[in-house]
Amino acid sequence: MEDVIIKIKGMMCEHCEKMIHDAAVGVKGVRKAKADLKKAR
């Protein structure tokens, strides 16, 4: 399994963080995902 870190611009709240997480885990082949508001990734 490979780790991939993607920088995200525009996250402003925990709701944005959850939306990014949910979108990432919805991608075929993604087994787990974590969005981090403070680190913008």
Image (cartoon, rainbow, N blue to C red):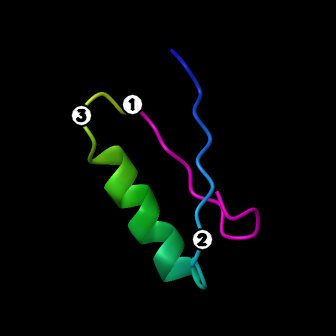
Residue type pointed to by label 3 = Lys
Label 2 crowd (10 A; few <14 / some 14-19 / many >=20): few
- Give percent across and percent down for residue 4: 57, 33
Of badges 3 and 2, nearer the viewer stands: 2
**Does residue 9 belong to the magenta stretch?**
no
| Pointer 1 residue | 31
Q: Label 3, label 2: how many angstroms apart (C-alpha)?
A: 23 Å
Sequence-first tag of 2 and 1: 2
Classify 6 as above or below 18.
Answer: above
Of badges 1 and 3, nearer the viewer stands: 3
- Give percent across and percent down for residue 21: 44, 57
Label 3 crowd (10 A; few <14 / some 14-19 / many >=20): few
| Pointer 3 residue | 28
**Does residue 33 belong to the magenta stretch?**
yes
Q: For the point 51% across and 15% down, which residue is it?
A: 1
Residue type pointed to by label 1 = Arg
Q: Label 1, label 3: how many angstroms apart (C-alpha)?
A: 8 Å
